[in-house]
Image (tube, helix red, strand yellow):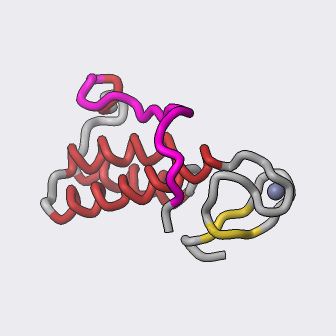
Amino acid sequence: MSIKECRCPTCGAVQSWRDECRRCGTDISLLRRLADESRRLQGELLDALSDNDLSKAQCVMERLLAVSTDPLYELLHGFIRHRGGFPAAQSCVATGTFAPVTIKASESNSVSS
Ligand SMILES: [Zn+2]
């Protein structure tokens, strides 16, 4: 399964990103929006790391962890914090630096490729 594909949580069908499963019709639009947000945040993270801005990188990581369960992000988050991000008890969301990620059901229904 590539980054351009998803697996339906209901029937397991692998397919390109869409709002509705091609096999069983389950609404998978929220999964697509989470994947879109995750890819966008990955770009922000790379920009922050390129700028050596570890505080910003940590904030982006916290937002990324809110939309992804990839264990690699947990490791990277710990690494960034260790290298000079905020202390563990002082997260970006807790300090109000960034608001938590929210994805509204009414947002765009366009299909990304
Ligand atoms: Zn399905």
* Magenta residue check for 70: no
Residue 40 % position (x, y): 37, 56
* Relative horizontal placement of residue 48, taking residue 103 as reference (left or right): left
Query: Image point 74% across, 69% down: which residue?
Result: 14
Q: For this rendering, which residue is in front, 20 or 5?
A: 20
Q: What secondary structure predominates along the stretch shown in magenta?
A: loop
Image quarter where the N terminus lies is: bottom right
Ligand 1 quadrant assignment = bottom right
Query: Image point 30% across, 45% down: which residue?
Result: 58
Query: Image point 30% across, 56% down: which residue?
Result: 45
Residue 42 % position (x, y): 37, 59
Residue 91 % position (x, y): 33, 31
Q: For this rendering, which residue is in front, 9 or 18?
A: 18
Q: Which residues are magenta?
A: 95-111
Q: For this rendering, which residue is in front, 36 or 59?
A: 36
* Relative horizontal placement of residue 27, taking residue 106 as reference (left or right): right
